[in-house]
Amino acid sequence: MKRLYSILVLSLVLMPSTLAARTIADFFASEPGNIFTLLTRTHRLDMVDYYNSGQVVDVPNNLAGEARLIELDSTYLKVQTSGSRVVEMLMRKAGKDTVITVIETVMTPVPDSRLTQWNVHWQQYISDRLFTMPAIDDFIVGKMPRDLRLDLQDAMVFPLIRLSFTGANHDTIEASHGLEQFLAPVEYKRFATYLKPSVRYRFNGLKIKPVKK
């Protein structure tokens, strides 16, 4: 009897880790509403069920719009939560911790993203040392004339940067600027020679660092 009691106690102790989210779909369903404000838990579960049965079905969001699960595997998902917003989520290991890295992109109409990282309890990691959002200067190559650089800074008072997971395992992040879409063609041509279209980042534990070439 005592042994049975010990087994039951051990089972209860282990239950949180056993039942904890094992795939990104579990985290998608358990997110408390900081990211998926437009989708109820029922909506999200429906989307996963549809996707796993081979169907791509639009579900209603809380603004009378539609949402769609675009891509899903055990560690990554991409979902369009409305006509103007896309969310990507990646579950990864950082040492002994499981981390959920989230990229939210809004079409403004030029895409603009933000990146956040969370633990399995949906508590956010907040530190400027973990990831620094790129600025326009990070895309400049060569020696841009000072007057041209000042003009570029004036043109991009609010830099719009798109982030997305890349690589076969979504293990890198690509950042791209929206200057070509944001500026008139004649204006963009003035800067194009000095700009690279994107920069890449890699994971290093909790940190996300630029890839040095």
Image (spheres, grey):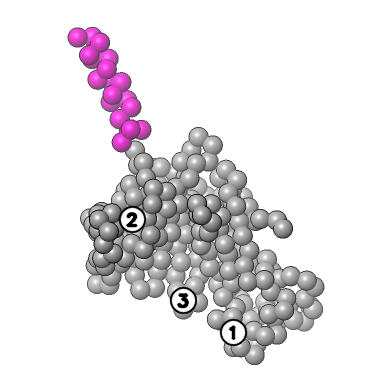
**Residue that mark 2 sits on:** 33
Amino acid tagged 3: Thr
Report crowding for label 3: few under 14, some 14 to 19, many 20 or more residues within 10 A (C-alpha): few
Above or below residue 189? Residue 93 is above
Whether the magenta-drawn stretch holds residue 2 is answered as: yes
Amino acid tagged 2: Gly
State the mark number for residue 183: 1
Sequence-earlier tag: 3 or 2: 2
Above or below residue 117? Residue 198 is below
State the mark number for residue 108: 3
Residue at the (74%, 81%) spot, across then down: 148
Residue at the (58%, 69%) spot, across then down: 176
**Front label number (2 vs 1):** 1
Q: Quadrant of the C terminus?
A: bottom right
Question: Of helix, strand and loop, which mostly describes the magenta segment?
Answer: helix
Image-quadrant location for residue 212: bottom right
In space, the residues marked 1 and 3 are separated at their CA atoms by 14 Å
- Magenta region: which residues? 1-19
